[in-house]
Amino acid sequence: MKLVIGIVRPEQANQVLEALHRAEVRGFSISRVQGHGGEMDRVETYRGTTVQMGLSEKVRFEVAVSDGFVDKTVQALCEGGRTGEVGDGKIFVVPLDHAVRIRTGDTDEGAVTPVSK
Amino acid sequence: MIAAIDTGDTAWMLTATALVLMMTPALGLFYAGLVRSKNTLNTFMMCIAAIAVAAVTWAAVGYSLAFDGNGDLVGGLGNAFMQGVDFDPRPEGTIPELVFFAFQATFCIITVALISGAVVERMRFGAFLLFAALWSVLVYAVLAHWAFGEGWLLTGGTLDFAGGVPVEMASGFSALAAALVVGARKDYGRQALLPHNAVYVLLGAGLLWFGWFGFNGGSGFSTGQNSVLAFTNTLLCPATTLVAWFVLDLMRGRKVTAIGAATAIIVGCVLITPAGGYVSPGWAMALGALGAIPSWGIIAYRTRTRVDETLDVLAAHGAAGFFGILFIGFVAQTGWNGVSDGLLYGNADQLWDQAKAALAAPAYAFVATFVLLKVIGAVMPLRATDREEAMGMDINQHGEEAYVTGEGAILLLPDDHGKAAVPVADPG
């Protein structure tokens, strides 16, 4: 059981959602985050004040999956998130000790496997 | 005979001109609320750009082509670069020609801005500027001459009080052509592309309605009876359109929607634009209710097609302008307008005069815009790349964002030429 964290461009978020759907990964959450990974390409000007945007908007996917789904999930995140330019984001896979489904009290594998009805 | 200047008329027309100019930023707010947040500024800026571009082209040649001389199809160049436009009134006018010029300029401006609704979220800003400049002369000025100058529609007896021909049908059918040439947004039909701020939409619609009292109320160029009638009809007609839209919304979804209400205000104002000074208040209310139906239907149908006429300029302006122009042919009353009766009051010819405008104006606007954009598209790309479209037009066309937080932004000093010492990790 792993927690897959994928941080992607907001404009690629819909592609990732579609890729996850195709990979039959059904349960995840997303949040809007700001981050910095080396890209410094955005310069904006407001009434003569020119700034380089050090933090970029990103979307963070968190997907808790059973071991069999880890590769599929990572692949879907890569496929949906990649544009080839600096700033496409990162994927982190971390071990997951324990999971509980609040409604039923199901734990671990049972909790991360979506109900199919 | 040159009539004397009337101070009351002049005072009202100065006010009306300012009201109409305000409609363009109001339209910007309305449109900006309807797009996704990453395109807010670009959408608003297309309307602001219309003020910049169309005011200049209008002063240069547009006004002259519309209002100089009595050619059937187009005016002359006698007033080009505002030659002879001064404090004297036009023949049969009671206001200085300078005021008349400015009032008409604001009409050209908002019409150009209206078309942007068809191409927002993807058309390059530079290409839009060139399109706006050429369209304001080649399409707007020509149609304004037909209906307001001494062109073939006006002299042929077509009644168009405040711009069903050059403003509403012209923008609506040009918008359809523009949407077809520029093409759909890349995510259109695949993802839900939702309005990002319904409050902007409602506020924009409210300000447009407010400005429309100058638009219709000023189109009699006086404080006379036609102006007063148009003013009050501008209150009544959109109000009944709102009621009708509520009913249509309730029948379909069992809920009255806010964005539907904002749309209804625009549709109602458009419906009464050509008819304002010619129909009775009772018929204006009937027009508002009946005219809601085609626009509502086209909006419901259009979203099921591949045509990404993004903000429904055709439904709100083209269809409602068409309906309003024809409606005059049925219910105009000499007792109210002092000019002509419609079919219901025994004058079938008026309906024919209205039908000519309802066929010719959309045809010219559609074909001219289609060809114009094809030509511009041959010399420069009309739309942003898919990647730029995905990032949002605000950042890549203007280098700004509507909802910037400033967190993590590094100030660049003027002499750095974009290469400031970067205090955070630099991979280079």
Image: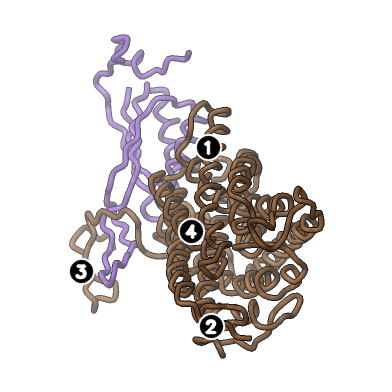
Chain colours: A purple, B brown
Please determine if labels 3 and 1 lie on a single subunit.
yes
Say what amino acid the circle numbered 4 marks: Phe
Q: Nearer the viewer, residue B60 or A27?
A: B60
Question: Marks 3/4: CA distance?
Answer: 55 Å
How far apart marks 3 and 1 lie (CA) works out to 61 Å
Q: Quadrant of residue B413?
A: bottom left
Which residue is pictured at 43% across the width and 48% down the height?
Answer: B201
| Residue B314, placed above or below residue A28 | below
Is label 2 in contact with label 1 (beta carbons under 8 Å)? no
Q: What x and y, as percent, mark residue A86?
A: 38, 55
Question: What chain does mark 3 sit on?
Answer: B
The count of marks equals 4
Label 1 vs label 4: CA separation?
20 Å
**Same-subunit check for callouts 4 and 2:** yes
Q: Position of residue B309 (x, y in %)?
A: 60, 51
Residue B146 visible in image: yes
Q: Using the image, tell me which numbered label, if any, was put on residue B243.
A: 1
Chain letter for mark 4? B
User: N-terminal of the two: label 3 or label 4?
Assistant: 4
Q: Quadrant of the C terminus of chain B?
A: bottom left
- The local crowd at label 3, few if under 14, some if 14 to 19, many if 20 or more residues have their Cα within 10 Å, is few
Q: Nearer the viewer, mark 3 or mark 2?
A: 2
Q: Amino acid at mark 2?
A: Ala
Does the rendering let one see residue A84?
A: no
Which quarter of the figure is the N terminus of chain B placed in? bottom right
Q: Position of residue B126 (x, y in %)?
A: 51, 70
* Marked residue nearer the N-terminal end (3 or 2): 2
**Which chain does tag 1 point to?**
B
Residue at which label 2 appears: B4
Circle 2 crowding by C-alpha within 10 Å: few under 14, some 14–19, many from 20 = few
**Circle number at residue B421:** 3
